[in-house]
Image (cartoon, rainbow, N blue to C red):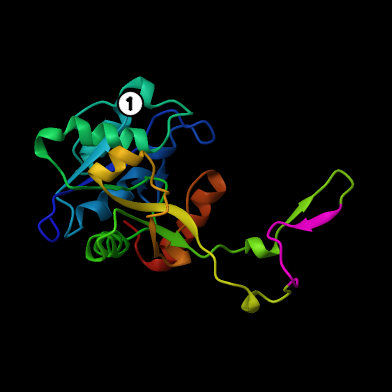
């Protein structure tokens, strides 16, 4: 609980990963991938309850073994490739509705480097600021001001129109991209908007070294290196 508000955390982890089969429970530095998110979520001083939402019994069993609750099995229709990410979160809130949570936190298992400081910092930014939604963002490696469209003839045109093309990163405006690590939202607001990204959404900046998102096997190797370097090996 934080400032008198009950906070639910959910980790969404479906079983149908195509790029890396079994990705959510694949070992990473001695722990299944999902366990890194469970471990940090359970350390939070703000979260009242942490549940894992999955359609896969193996994932649910691993989640329980690492301390998460699995009070329901996610319906198959909410575990398809084209299922919007917000739908399993809203399902979790509705499934646990008798407990009436005020805020819901989404922790995606593919962000294993995020820490409890990132989680609680994002929650505090949301509630202290009176915002309906705050999500973690990171400054990208490549600025969109350096990006171009290319036509069929190979002619380049700036993705973002500029009066003068800048050649130094230091001269560019800072830009940020959602990194998928932490999403915090007012439950009633999320049920109404059915989206995290609205004109009301605020960003909470996270360090680049903790913002790695796992999509493929190369990302596993990168995260393993970063975890070893940080001294956080299980």
Q: As drawn, is 17 to the left or to the right of 5? A: right
Residue located farthest toward the top when viewing the structure as drawn:
76
Front residue of 96/116: it is 96
Read off the magenta span.
155-165
| Relative to 15, residue 49 above or below | below
Question: Where in the figure is residue 139, as x and y percent of width and height?
Answer: 52, 65
Classify residue 90 by image quadrant.
top left
In the structure shown, which secondary structural element does the residue marked by tag 1 occupy? Answer: loop
Question: Where in the figure is residue 143, as x and y percent of width and height?
Answer: 62, 64
Secondary structure that dominates the magenta span: loop
Residue located farthest toward the right when viewing the structure as drawn:
153
Q: As drawn, is 186 to the left or to the right of 140? A: left
| Relative to 110, residue 94 above or below | above
Classify residue 56 by image quadrant.
top left
State the residue at coordinates (46%, 55%). 178
Q: Which residue is mark 1?
A: 55
State the residue at coordinates (24%, 34%). 92
Q: How many marks?
A: 1
Check disc 1: other Cα within 10 Å, few if <14, some if 14-19, many if 20+: many
Question: Where in the figure is residue 124, as x and y percent of width and height?
Answer: 24, 64
């Amino acid at each position: 609980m934080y400032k008198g508000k009950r906070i639910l955390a959910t980790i969404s982890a479906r079983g149908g990963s195509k790029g890396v089969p079994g990705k959510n429970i694949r070992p990473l530095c001695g722990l299944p991938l999902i366990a890194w998110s469970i471990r940090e979520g359970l350390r939070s001083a703000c979260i009242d309850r942490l549940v894992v939402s999955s359609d896969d019994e193996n994932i649910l069993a691993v989640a329980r073994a690492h301390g998460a609750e699995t009070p329901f099995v996610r319906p198959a229709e909410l575990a398809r490739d084209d299922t919007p990410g917000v739908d399993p979160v809203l399902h979790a809130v509705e499934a646990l509705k008798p407990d009436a949570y005020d805020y819901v936190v989404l922790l995606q298992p593919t962000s294993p480097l995020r820490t409890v400081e990132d989680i609680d910092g994002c929650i505090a930014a949301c509630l202290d600021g009176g915002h309906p939604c705050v999500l973690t963002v990171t400054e990208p490696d490549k600025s969109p001001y350096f990006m171009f469209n290319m036509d069929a003839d190979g002619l380049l045109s700036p993705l973002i129109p500029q009066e003068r093309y800048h050649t130094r990163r230091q001269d560019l405006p800072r830009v940020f991209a959602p990194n998928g690590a932490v999403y915090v939202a007012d439950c009633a607001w999320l049920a109404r908007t059915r989206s995290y990204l609205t004109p009301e959404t605020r960003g909470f900046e996270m360090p680049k070294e903790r913002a790695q998102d796992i999509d493929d096997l190369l990302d596993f190797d990168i995260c393993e290196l970063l975890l070893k370097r940080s001294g956080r090996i299980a």
